[in-house]
Image (cartoon, helix red, strand yellow):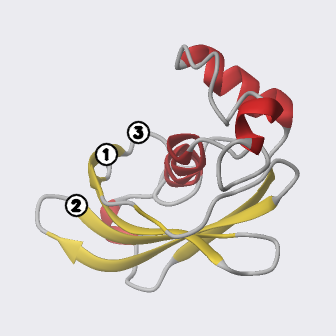
Amino acid sequence: MIKQLAYEDVQIGDYAEMKKTILAKDVDAFASIMNDKESFHVSDEVAQQFFFKKRICHGMHIASYISELIGKELPGFGTIYISQTLDFKKPVYLGTTIKIHVKVIEKLPNKRLRISTIITDDIEDIVLVGEAVVKTYK
């Protein structure tokens, strides 16, 4: 079932969450799209040469789950992204389960919403924080 909230139905404080385990196959698929063939994202040998020491997920890959949550849950289908800030705090290693959390913090004119966006890892450390401005379809 497609979820699609109208601007009038969204309240300040409304939130949505989802979890995602970062798998090597997902990072490899994202790397393929990005034409990333030799970085610490895709190579254990290259990763060992950097301070990460192990493969990590692309930051923009992690951030893309914010878009998924906004587009599927809050406010849902038909949402248009206006802007997104991203402050990366910590790398996400393969096998980590992240929690994506979005919360409406302001209703703006013209059916726009300001949304807090936070991603934490499986020990509840913040790995990404930011804000989105989106426009509802309805």
Q: Residues within 10 Å of mark 3 (few under 14, many from 20)?
A: some
**Distance CA(mark 2)–CA(mark 1):** 9 Å
Q: Nearer the viewer, mark 2 or mark 1?
A: 1
Question: Does residue 117 appear left or right of residue 23 in this picture?
Answer: left
The answer to which of marks 3 and 2 sits earlier in the sequence is 3
In the rendered image, the residue lying farthest to the front is 49
Three-letter code for the amino acid on which mark 1 is drawn: Tyr
Three-letter code for the amino acid on which mark 2 is drawn: Arg
In terms of secondary structure, where does tag 3 sit? loop
- Quarter of the figure with residue 91: bottom right
Residue placed under numbered mark 1 in the picture: 81
Whether residue 99 is situated above or below residue 123 in the rendered picture: above
Three-letter code for the amino acid on which mark 3 is drawn: Gly
Question: Does residue 94 appear left or right of residue 108 in this picture?
Answer: right
Residue 116 position, x and y percent, is 41, 74
Residue 16 position, x and y percent, is 60, 69
Residue placed under numbered mark 2 in the picture: 112
Q: Nearer the viewer, residue 8 or 117?
A: 117
Residue drawn at (85%, 40%) of the image:
23
Residue drawn at (67%, 35%) of the image:
41
Residue drawn at (50%, 42%) of the image:
60
- Quarter of the figure with residue 119: bottom right
Q: Give the position of the N terminus as an image quadrant.
A: top right
Residue 37 position, x and y percent, is 63, 15
In the rendered image, the residue lying farthest to the bottom is 13
- Contact? badges 1 and 3 (CB < 8 Å): no
Count of number-bearing discs: 3
Residue placed under numbered mark 3 in the picture: 78
Residue drawn at (50%, 54%) of the image:
70
Question: Does residue 43 appear left or right of residue 75 in this picture?
Answer: right
Question: Does residue 93 appear left or right of residue 6 in this picture?
Answer: right
